[in-house]
Image (cartoon, rainbow, N blue to C red):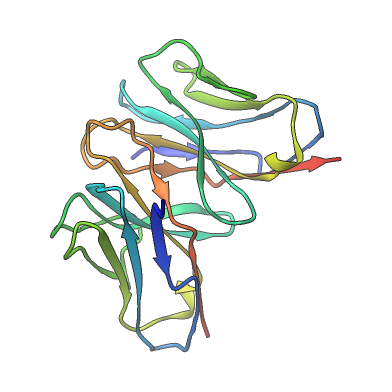
Amino acid sequence: AQTVTQSQPEMSVQEAETVTLSCTYDTSESDYYLFWYKQPPSRQMILVIRQEAYKQQNATENRFSVNFQKAAKSFSLKISDSQLGDAAMYFCAYRIPFGNEKLTFGTGTRLTIIP
Amino acid sequence: NAGVTQTPKFRVLKTGQSMTLLCAQDMNHEYMYWYRQDPGMGLRLIHYSVGEGTTAKGEVPDGYNVSRLKKQNFLLGLESAAPSQTSVYFCASSYSQLGTGELFFGEGSRLTVL
């Protein structure tokens, strides 16, 4: 079974600084998707960024970028120029591309932004 | 642009009572899911559906039942609520296999069982 591990329950960063959230996963598949979801205090989960395993180039969405290391099964999220609105729980998730498309989530990292 | 809507948003039950959570999506998605979120445990899949009239068990299905009679609706039922089912429940939907896998979530339903 696939597992997703987030070893940092909590992280904090000064506003305008850069922070990296860690995620590792375990799978025997060669093709899959990886995601970072954000859950602000409003509770609704929002997709931040996704990475297809067959792509070597790291995904980037504005201030958010990933460091995808397929051999190491690592998928970290870097947030640059942190803003107060980035404060949230961040969940790493994994999915195989075919079949029933179930997402497997990590346990989350709570990010605090220090003004 | 409603997306995924869950009702009710909050509910308090006594042990042994029953209730149904309703999830409705207006994006014509084939796949729908029910997750529960507990502190320190992330989101765990309860049941899911790959199309109208189909349901399947997820990671933690015991104590729950589901139905998908209409494509846009996915109901989660608790026949005899237990304190262990106190949680925040999230419904989500997604496109079929040709999609990129993004799940669209509702705002969650907080259930407390006394």
Percent x, y of residue A62: 60, 23
Identify the residue at horizontal 47%, vertical 89% (top origin).
Answer: B14
The one of B5 and A21 positioned closer to us in this rendering? B5
The one of A27 and A37 positioned closer to us in this rendering? A37
Identify the residue at horizontal 29%, vertical 53% (top origin).
Answer: B32
Q: Residue furthest top?
A: A56
Q: Is residue A79 above or below residue A87?
A: above
Identify the residue at horizontal 54%, vertical 47% (top origin).
Answer: A107
Q: Residue furthest left?
A: B53
Q: Residue furthest right?
A: A115
- Write down the quadrant of residue A96 in the picture: top left
Percent x, y of residue A100: 23, 42
Query: How many discs appear?
Result: 0
The one of A62 and B18 positioned closer to us in this rendering? A62
Percent x, y of residue B110: 52, 70
Q: Is residue B106 above or below residue A66?
A: below
Q: Residue furthest front?
A: B1
The one of A21 and B73 positioned closer to us in this rendering? B73
Q: Is residue B31 above or below residue B13?
A: above
Q: Is residue B16 above or below residue A114?
A: below
